[in-house]
Image (tube, grey):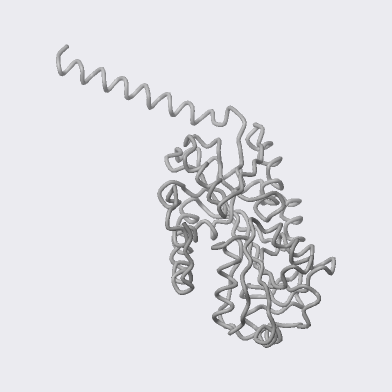
Amino acid sequence: MSLQRRAILLACTAALAAASATAQTADWPTKTLRIVVPYPPGGSSDIIARSISQALSESLKQSVIVENKPGANGNLGADFVAKAEPDGYTMLLCDVGALAISPSVYTKLSFDPSKDLRGVTMLAYSPHLLVVHPSVPVNNLKELIAYSKKNELNFAVTATGSAPHLAGVALERASGARWQYIPYKGGVTAIQDTVAGQTQVLMNGMLATLPQVQNGKLKVLGVSKSTRMPLIGDVPTIAEQGVAGYESGTWQGVLLPRGTPDAVVQKLNKALITAIRAPEIRSRLAGQGAEVVTMTSSEQDQFFTKERARWASVVKAANIKLD
């Protein structure tokens, strides 16, 4: 076979493959989609995933299942998605800020979220609430700081190196408070033990924590947002209480394996935004303390890069490292 003829055949083969891929993308999706939540059931990401799964299914005209894959501070489920087929059928719904922390905390990470995952859209933001067990005799941050210097306090963290953990570290360093960190394997168990009084202080996403404040099982001292939350307008921000510029929270978003076709990413971006902005879902989340926040794929990737740099300095200052 001549070189010219071989070149023509290769070009035709490539053209046919490209045409086939384009046709498959146009028809996407043609089977069940899976939302992987890398945390136990009941946390903020799980709540968001289950809130939008039916609306997403209706929009894409395919079944959508939610699958919890907890472990290693969310890295087990994230690694699973990072190594999945880049076809758009397996997506990761997690705290994007927490995911950005992992490269700084873990000395050995089986994947690189910046290289192995790409953003689709952010979905919601929920500020952290600083809460204590009702038995702790304080009513604001100033009193908590003073009390912590004279009494032993256990601070429940959803996992070592998690966003709530680093939020606690940042607050401790900025305010002069003192406490011992008690690590858990998820926000639900951290909340449960604080409600039970086994730990006394907790910082966690408002979406998962507010119900325990509303039923009187936890006492809220501050919210980690630059402005007060209308839902709890009488609760001052942490910045208002003397820690200037303090802000943290959980940012739920969706990511896909790197290499997923742009057309699939854009179609999923549109469907997810439609689902999360549905009036009944937006209203339900607002009633639980979460704000709907959406982005383009590139905007979410830029957010991730900034968060990774932001928290790397906190991790370094606190000397937090995990294998």
Residue 209: x and y in percent read: 73, 63
Q: Is 11 situated left or right of 72 in this image?
A: left
Q: Position of residue 145 (x, y in %)?
A: 66, 84
Q: Which quarter of the rendering shows the N terminus?
A: top left
Residue 43, position as x, y percentages in the image: 69, 55
Residue in the foreground of this view, choosing between 283 and 93: 93
Q: Is residue 214 above or below residue 102?
A: below
Q: Residue at x 45, y 38 (%)?
A: 261
Would residue 266 be visible to someone looking at this image?
A: no
Near-viewer residue (113 or 290) = 113
Give 37 or 287, whichever is nearer the viewer.
Answer: 37
Where is residue 189 shown, x and y percent of the image?
Answer: 71, 58
Tell whether 54 sits left or right of 106.
right
Q: Which residue is at a point 67% across and 73% down the rendered structure image?
A: 154
Image position of 193 with respect to 247: above or below: above
The extreme top residue here reads 1
The residue sitting at 57% across, 62% down in the picture is: 162
Q: From the viewer's perspective, is 134 left or right of 169? A: right
Q: Based on the displayed image, in which of its 4 quarters is residue 282 positioned?
A: bottom right
| Visible residue check, residue 263 | yes
